[in-house]
Amino acid sequence: MSEITVATRYAKSIIDLAQEQGIVAEIKADMDLFLKTLKGSPELVAVLANPIISQSKKVKILDEIFAGKVNKVTTAFFKLMVNKGRGEVLFATAGEYINLYNVKNHITKAKVTSATTLSDANKATLVAELQAAIGGTVVLETKTDAALIGGFVLNVGDRQVDTSIAASLKKMKKEFAAKA
């Protein structure tokens, strides 16, 4: 069974438990903290994935790092996952929890890459137009890439809109090459 399938199943179970207890947003904040911590510590990722390190040692490490910082349900979930030999899928499970949370709360992530830094007014306009088009809340991530020359590339889910000058030039080059 693939890691993402396993992670999705565990994420569904923890979000269901969180809903029963009315702590869905609190657990989401815990998962955000967990992901941030793992992204900043490849050593911790390696420890969780290492089958040679005992489960009790992994639980102790997680306790030391997250004691008092996360909900007791999150702590119990981490212990359960590690004790079941699923420490290596904790990262993916946390990511899937956040994805499920976003779906349930109609939150869509969008990423815009532009040739120059977008002004706050441009960001607000883009978010407003996206929210009107797709509904729900849009969380916009911005990035700057001078190689685009001008324009922007917008990614929302599995869709992409490329209005960059670099893409237009590449398309023109292809058309000229095909005609020549």
Image (tube, rainbow, N blue to C red):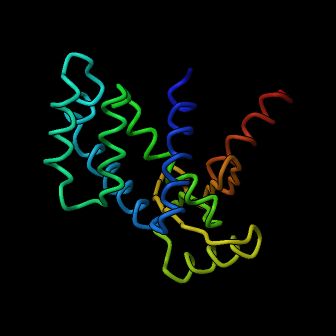
Is 69 situated left or right of 174 in this image?
left
Is 155 situated left or right of 20 in this image?
right
* Viewer-closest of 172 and 79: 79
Q: Position of residue 120 (x, y in %)?
A: 49, 80
Residue at the (65%, 56%) spot, across then down: 156
* Viewer-closest of 5 and 85: 85
Q: Quadrant of residue 173?
A: top right
Q: Quadrant of residue 144?
A: bottom left
Residue at the (55%, 59%) spot, across then down: 101
Residue at the (50%, 27%) spot, across then down: 3
Q: Is residue 127 above or below residue 148?
A: below
Q: Position of residue 174 (x, y in %)?
A: 75, 34
* Viewer-closest of 60 and 104: 60
Q: Is residue 162 above or below residue 106?
A: above
Q: Is residue 107 above or below residue 47?
A: below
Q: Position of residue 99 (x, y in %)?
A: 55, 52
Q: In the orientation shown, which residue stands out farthest toward the right? A: 179
Is 161 situated left or right of 46 in this image?
right
